[in-house]
Image (spheres, rainbow, N blue to C red):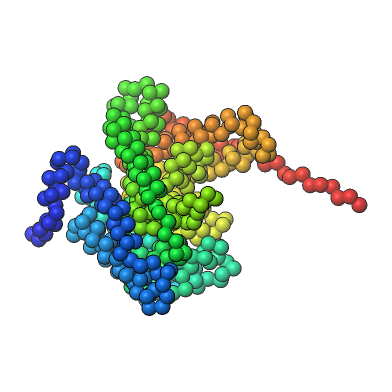
Amino acid sequence: NMVKLPPMPWEGAIASLSSTVGLPADQLRFTLSMLIAIPVGFLFKAVTQDPYKVEGNKKATAIVQRHTLCMTIGLSFMIFLYGYDAIHSVVSSVVGFLILRLIPTKSVHVWMSVWAMSYLLGSHAYRMIVAYLGWELDFTNSQLLLTQKLMNIGFALFDSSRDPQKCTEEQNKRKLSRPPTFLEYFGYIFALQTLLGGPATDYNDYICWIDGSNAKGKNPSPVSAILKRLGGGVLCVICFVVLGGQYPVTKVGDLDWLNKQNPLYVFIYINGALFLFRHRYYFAWTLSDAACNAAGLGYCGDDENGNPRWDGVLNQNYAAVEGAVNFRSAMTGWNICTSNWLRRCVYERVPPNGPRTACSFLMSALWHGFYPGYFLTFLSCGLVNETARILRRHLRPLIIPDEKAEKSVVAQVYHVASWALTMVTLNYCAVPFVVLAFDLSIGYWVYWRFAPHFIALAIYLLLPVILPLRKPKTASKKE
């Protein structure tokens, strides 16, 4: 018989509050943690000294204090959120630290990637066994972000062993000349502001925040930015909880319901329901961004009017996603730090003539989990992304040949049509991401006879033949 561990001391209070407010215990713990992280951020700044303003031993002491607080506070929140399951974050990060210390720099990225992804995939497999198709928030939520952090450090250290001329400008800027110390490493891994809902910032961004070099001695007020994000969070709750509750996105997985509805109604319903559903993620990311700003993370200088900018660290760009006129914009504006991680650790590591896009989308699917819906969504997104690129290269120059044409009515109609096509296609591809199961995913696509897939494939194969790229005219040489 397995030994049953005693419940955490706060579980009774959480269960009571959960029944009172009508929110599941896991979501309640997560929401409370996100909200508490904001005042904790202000407290972090208040009790620590800005290392940028002091020198010598005082500077070193201030940096150590900040690392130690990040590690301690982050671990405490992990235990509150996940109880005994917080051990997974500790074990995986400890082994990651040993890999950085023991493995040669030239191969450290391989070992780190294999370890981080193996632990994550094992966690996904366990979750599928114990809670198939469940949406409960458990330790895998933070494990997703921890995996990104481990691989970010591994590749940054590996880049220091490469020829600088073979690295990109960004790789040269972010590479690490040495492995992080114990406090640097675990402070980064467990930094509260980036461990609950992201963003899983790059290690260099974390260090610049800790040592104060991002603000260079300034103490800009984040209150305005935080209030704006909290206001956005309230709107997200209205969209997801109030309105989304009236139009549950799970209906698209009900094949009986689909077959009884008019296709036009299904089309309108799914596009509206998925728009509302996305606000579930916007809510978490918006609160995370607010927590980062409260602690001073995300400040990136002042704008032309002298007001502080707080978009240095972001989870999402709402306008870039919901107003996307092409598929790439939607992808890069959604879960920004994950897009950066995929680009830095996957896309740029595949040879230029290799399947960079396919590898990136496949990695994204694996990172999310083993559910067939993830693979169906991201592989379809890969096809649509390449098709959108073909359309932009071959069709756009005929409609908008130069900058002057950008202001024409035809150009505006083109942009509106591009936006509508992007959002409809995005929602079509995203259904498996929501329903997860293979039969439900395919059932929805069968309802539409896979038409978007066939159209995308036809455009990808035929448009370059029908509308070949025009060769630039070369000026004749005068003798």
The answer to whether residue 437 is above or below residue 54 is above
Q: Position of residue 319 (x, y in %)?
A: 46, 40
Q: Position of residue 303 (x, y in %)?
A: 52, 51
* Nearer to me, 469 or 330: 330
**From the viewer's perspective, is 140 left or right of 102?**
left
- The residue drawn where x is 34% and y is 22% is 261
**From the viewer's perspective, is 245 left or right of 352?**
left
Q: Quadrant of the N terminus?
A: bottom left
Decide if residue 346 is in sight here: no
* Nearer to me, 145 or 45: 45
Q: Residue furthest left?
A: 1
Q: Position of residue 289 (x, y in %)?
A: 37, 51
* Nearer to me, 328 or 170: 170
- The residue drawn where x is 34% and y is 74% is 61
Decide if residue 159 is in sight here: yes
Q: Quadrant of residue 67?
A: bottom left
The answer to whether residue 189 is above or below residue 401 is below
**Numbered label tally:** 0
- The residue drawn where x is 52% and y is 65% is 173
**From the viewer's perspective, is 53 left or right of 252?**
right
Q: Residue furthest right?
A: 479
- The residue drawn where x is 55% and y is 65% is 167
Q: Position of residue 106 (x, y in %)?
A: 46, 72
* Nearer to me, 375 or 149: 149
The answer to whether residue 321 is above or below residue 176 is above
Q: Residue furthest bottom?
A: 57
